[in-house]
């Protein structure tokens, strides 16, 4: 079996290359900017589109022209608005397509026990079956395109927005002093903010500006923020805190999160200490 990855030089492109190679595929890359010949696509049994979200639909339409009969095109974009519609149109023309979202990044060394979201295009049963073959050790979660992007506004877009805003509050601060004084909550938050601001600008901007549901989600966040500030010091704060706590306690694992936070803190503190020692020894 042969696979071609469009966007093979990117983080997820490299991850897919290693993953598919491990499954026995012969993997090649295609990049029209490098003047690669379209025959690379026409030989593939599986074509993976792993490009920036804003150009995904355009790349899909260009790619379909060169695919051989029976081959499958799979795209892995983090947002599906527009992309899913393109795949639906492609399926009406007789193309085999998969619309999936691996719920992990290129740093994942092993996809086992991780989740891949599949957004049905035409034949959900056969699409799930093929997804299981490509991601055999993962959990497959079926979800519609609209619901996917709405939830991604909470899972992806909001954390990026909030952490960019938090990072903006640190610009004029002594970050070394902040780290030395940091306790559990701030250190975990600081590591998350640092990792997010170091992502490519194009990705951050797309996740913040490209999700049509983020405006509603961020407005809810701002309303909650204002309400928490206004209710602090009043009898209403306890009621508000209880309402939020009771809601989140519906998660059956909620009781272990405090322990997990401390374990994560100790782990990160140890890793940072090792990094500091290595930097001082250079």
Image (spheres, rainbow, N blue to C red):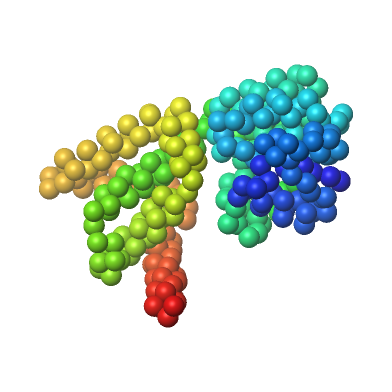
Left or right of 184? Residue 148 is right
Q: Is residue 221 above or below residue 85?
A: below
Q: Nearer the viewer, residue 252 or 194?
A: 194
Q: Is residue 246 above or below residue 119?
A: below
Q: Nearer the viewer, residue 244 or 130?
A: 130
Q: In the image, what residue occupies the spot 86% across and 31% down?
A: 68
Q: In the image, what residue occupies the spot 80% across and 29% down?
A: 66
Instruction: Locate residue 176, reporting x and y percent.
Output: 29, 66
The C terminus: image quadrant: bottom left
Name the image quarter holding residue 112: bottom right
Q: Is residue 98 above or below residue 138?
A: above
Left or right of 68? Residue 77 is left
Q: Is residue 193 visible?
A: yes
Left or right of 198? Residue 174 is left
Instruction: Locate residue 32, reporting x and y percent.
Output: 70, 35
Q: How many marks?
A: 0
Name the image quarter holding residue 78: top right
Name the image quarter holding residue 86: top right
Q: In the image, what residue occupies the spot 73% across and 23% down?
A: 90
- The residue positioned farthest toward the front in the image shown: 35
Q: Is residue 141 visible?
A: no
Instruction: Locate residue 163, reporting x and y percent.
Output: 36, 48
Instruction: Locate residue 274, reporting x and y percent.
Output: 44, 76
């Amino acid at each position: 079996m042969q696979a071609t990855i469009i966007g093979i030089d990117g983080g997820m492109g490299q991850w897919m290359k290693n993953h598919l190679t491990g499954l026995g595929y012969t993997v090649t890359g295609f990049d029209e900017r490098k003047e690669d010949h379209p025959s690379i696509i026409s030989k593939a049994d599986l074509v993976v589109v792993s490009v920036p979200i804003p150009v995904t639909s355009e790349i899909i339409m260009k790619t379909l022209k060169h695919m051989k009969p029976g081959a499958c095109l799979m795209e892995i974009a983090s947002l599906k608005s527009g992309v899913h519609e393109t795949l639906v149109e492609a399926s009406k023309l007789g193309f085999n397509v998969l619309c999936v979202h691996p719920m992990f990044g290129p740093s994942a060394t092993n996809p086992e026990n991780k989740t891949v979201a599949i957004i049905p295009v035409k034949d959900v049963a056969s699409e799930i079956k093929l997804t299981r073959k490509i991601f055999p050790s993962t959990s497959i979660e079926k979800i519609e395109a609209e619901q996917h992007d709405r939830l991604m506004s909470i899972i992806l877009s909001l954390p990026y927005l909030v952490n960019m805003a938090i990072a903006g509050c640190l610009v004029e601060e002594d970050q070394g002093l902040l780290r030395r004084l940091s306790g559990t909550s701030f250190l975990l938050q600081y590591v998350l903010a640092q990792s997010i601001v170091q992502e490519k600008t194009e990705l951050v901007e797309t996740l913040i500006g490209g999700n049509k549901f983020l405006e509603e989600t961020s407005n809810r966040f701002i309303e909650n923020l204002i309400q928490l500030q206004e209710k602090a010091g009043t009898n209403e704060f306890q009621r508000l805190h209880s309402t939020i706590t009771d809601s989140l306690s519906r998660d059956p694992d909620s009781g272990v999160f405090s322990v997990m936070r401390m374990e994560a803190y100790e782990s990160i503190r140890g890793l940072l200490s090792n990094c500091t020692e290595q930097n001082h020894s250079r």
